[in-house]
Image (tube, rainbow, N blue to C red):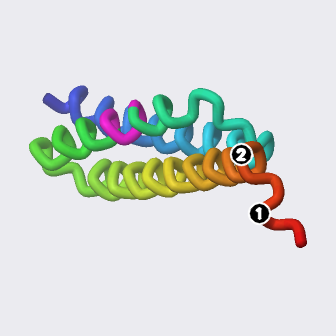
Amino acid sequence: MNSIKKYSDLISYLNLVAISLIYINSYLSKNNHHAFSVDTIFLVFSSFLLVISLILKRKKSIFTNILSIILSVMMNYYNISISYQDWIDREQPSAFTK
């Protein structure tokens, strides 16, 4: 049981690092080609890890997973806004010109 708790913390931290790196990459490149599926995977995986952390009563993992869920939602919102802006620029180029 002790190793499960230890690996739960490690997986939670690695999940947070992965979300942060993907978010930074998405922000720097402004490329969100597969971002929605990645956001959904991270959101589901973070939620799954949160449930496991709640069952194991690991406070560090719970906090890390809540932070991961918040970052996943923020990344999803950011990527949706980029896609919407790209769509506006492509479909309605005269909307912002006078």
Give the amino acid at mark 2: Glu
Which of the image's four quarters has the C terminus?
A: bottom right
Identified at 50% across, 48% down, the residue is 76
Q: Residue furthest right?
A: 98
Identified at 72% across, 37% down, the residue is 31
Residue beneath disc 2: 91
Q: Specify whether residue 54 is painted magenta.
A: no
Identified at 31% across, 36% down, the residue is 44
Q: Is residue 7 above or below residue 29?
A: above
The label on residue 40 is: none
Identified at 40% across, 31% down, the residue is 41
Give the amino acid at mark 1: Ala
The prevailing secondary structure element of the residues shown in magenta is: helix
Residue beneath disc 1: 95
Q: Specify whether residue 71 is in view.
A: yes
Location of residue 20 (image quadrant): top right
Horizontal arrangement in the rendering, residue 19 relative to residue 73 (left or right)? right
| Boundaries of the magenta span | 41-45
